Image: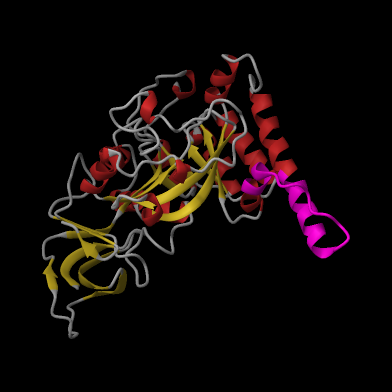
């Protein structure tokens, strides 16, 4: 299929006026300025429309806390053990949660969803398409990240249980202890592989889950709000040489230069939020703009169901009113989250070889509850 005549937002800030793109099977085969002159006769006229990549929510919990349910649909926090790296989001997510359809209706074709922030080491995050009924068929990467959490949430959960971690010191210590165990476990496994006289260590499923994190095959996502907790996350990332990501980063603007020097990206949000707990008292909607200005690679998220997932583009619009250049707003929910989450070879941009996840709008896409006129997922037109 050819999509001809639209204004094409590539997803990295680049815009092609009056261009075309060609889909071949599930992938994008070609994108170019001008008019298509090839032999494909299946053409969708996009004149007057804006074409973007499918939107990406870089951090949410849909399918883990199901819409309209209480305990029955709460599968995001295993609050019986502060260290649970072996838990897998794919085993807890329900793709029939109505939030998936709502996400798709508003152009969110990929979500990064996973455990909550009750535990210092919370478990494995997955990235998946929003079209489908079976998680195994929707997943792009599982795991795409390992969830760690600092600050108020683990403190609150385990203070009520009168057990560690009750302080920020203990939270960081538990994370370090588990990473150090996994590092020793990895060294023992490698030694056993090289020396036939050395027995391998006894299977440890928690250590096994952390090996890809230590090997930088899986990113370390740190839930943090306060500036001091962000610095602790950066410290741990540096100590263990992790491929780290800051999630929320509410006070990031207070130490934007420090984050920029560390070269660690930030997934900001939810942007639509009250200062509903002590960690959020310095919430400032300029955060995303100030981080971008400092040179930090940044995306935004809804943290759904904390904020309804269909408000992702509305959040992007709010960042524009708070200082993000309008031409960068689309990238906050397309190319940037793909890059931050390690999905840039599949989604987030309109480029040859990437998945055919596309949106066509007959109005400005960055706004409140703007629905795409046409939606493509994996090269298939679903609207």
**Residue at 44 percent of width and 47 percent of height:** 298
Viewer-proximal residue among 315 and 77: 77
Identify which residue, 57 or 326, lies in the foreground.
57
> Toward which corner of the image does residue 44 lie, by quadrant?
bottom left
Give the image location of residue 372, x and y in percent.
17, 52
| Main SS category, magenta section | helix
Which quadrant of the structure image shows residue 168?
A: top right
Give left or right: position of 262 versus 338. right
Q: Which residue is at a point 34% across and 65% down the rendered structure image?
A: 355
Q: Quadrant of the N terminus?
A: bottom left
Residue 145, position in %: x, y?
52, 47
Q: Residue furthest right?
A: 197
Specify whether residue 282 is in view.
Answer: yes
Locate the C terminus by quadrant. Answer: bottom left
The residue segment tinted magenta is: 182-209
Q: Is residue 94 above or below residue 195?
A: above
| Residue at image coords 31%, 27% | 69
| Left or right of 185 in this view: 342 | left
Residue 307 spot, x, y in % from top left: 32, 32
In-image side of 309 versus 78 (left or right): left
Q: Is residue 197 magenta?
A: yes
Residue 265 picture location, percent across and down: 51, 47
The verdict on residue 30 being magenta is: no
Along the viewing direction, whichever of 124 and 41 lies nearer the viewer: 124
């Amino acid at each position: 299929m050819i999509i001809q005549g639209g204004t094409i937002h590539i997803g990295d800030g680049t815009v092609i006026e009056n261009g075309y793109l060609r889909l071949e099977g599930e992938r994008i085969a070609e994108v170019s300025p001008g008019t298509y002159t090839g032999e494909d006769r299946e053409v969708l006229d996009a004149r007057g429309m804006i074409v973007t990549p499918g939107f990406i929510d870089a951090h949410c919990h849909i399918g883990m806390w199901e819409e309209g349910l209480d305990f029955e649909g709460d599968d995001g926090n295993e609050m019986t053990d502060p260290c649970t790296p072996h838990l897998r989001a794919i085993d807890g997510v329900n793709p029939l949660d109505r939030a998936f359809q709502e996400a798709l209706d508003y152009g969110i074709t990929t979500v990064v969803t996973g455990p909550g922030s009750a535990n210092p080491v919370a478990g494995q995050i997955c990235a998946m398409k929003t079209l489908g009924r079976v998680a195994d068929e929707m997943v792009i990467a599982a795991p795409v990240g390992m969830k760690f959490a600092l600050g108020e949430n683990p403190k609150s959960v385990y203070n009520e249980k009168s057990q560690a971690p009750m302080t920020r010191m203990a939270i960081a210590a538990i994370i370090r202890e588990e990473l150090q165990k996994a590092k020793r476990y990895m060294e023992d496994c490698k030694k056993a592989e090289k020396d036939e006289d050395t027995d391998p260590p006894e299977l440890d499923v928690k250590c096994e889950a952390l090996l890809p994190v230590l090997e930088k095959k899986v990113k370390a996502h740190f839930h943090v709000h306060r500036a001091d907790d962000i610095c602790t996350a950066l410290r741990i990332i540096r100590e263990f040489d992790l491929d780290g990501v800051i999630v929320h980063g509410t006070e990031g603007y207070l130490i934007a230069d420090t984050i920029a020097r560390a070269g660690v990206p930030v997934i900001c949000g939810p942007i639509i939020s009250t200062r509903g707990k002590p960690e959020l008292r310095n919430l400032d909607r300029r955060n995303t703009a100030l981080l971008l200005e400092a040179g930090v690679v940044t995306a935004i998220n809804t943290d759904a169901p904390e904020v309804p997932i269909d408000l992702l583009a509305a959040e992007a619009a709010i960042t524009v009113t708070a200082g993000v250049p309008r031409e960068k707003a689309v990238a906050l929910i397309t190319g940037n989250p793909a890059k931050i989450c390690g999905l840039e070879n599949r989604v987030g941009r309109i480029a040859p070889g990437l998945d055919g996840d596309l949106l066509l709008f007959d109005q400005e896409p960055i706004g409140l509850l703007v629905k795409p006129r046409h939606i493509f997922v994996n090269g298939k037109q679903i609207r």
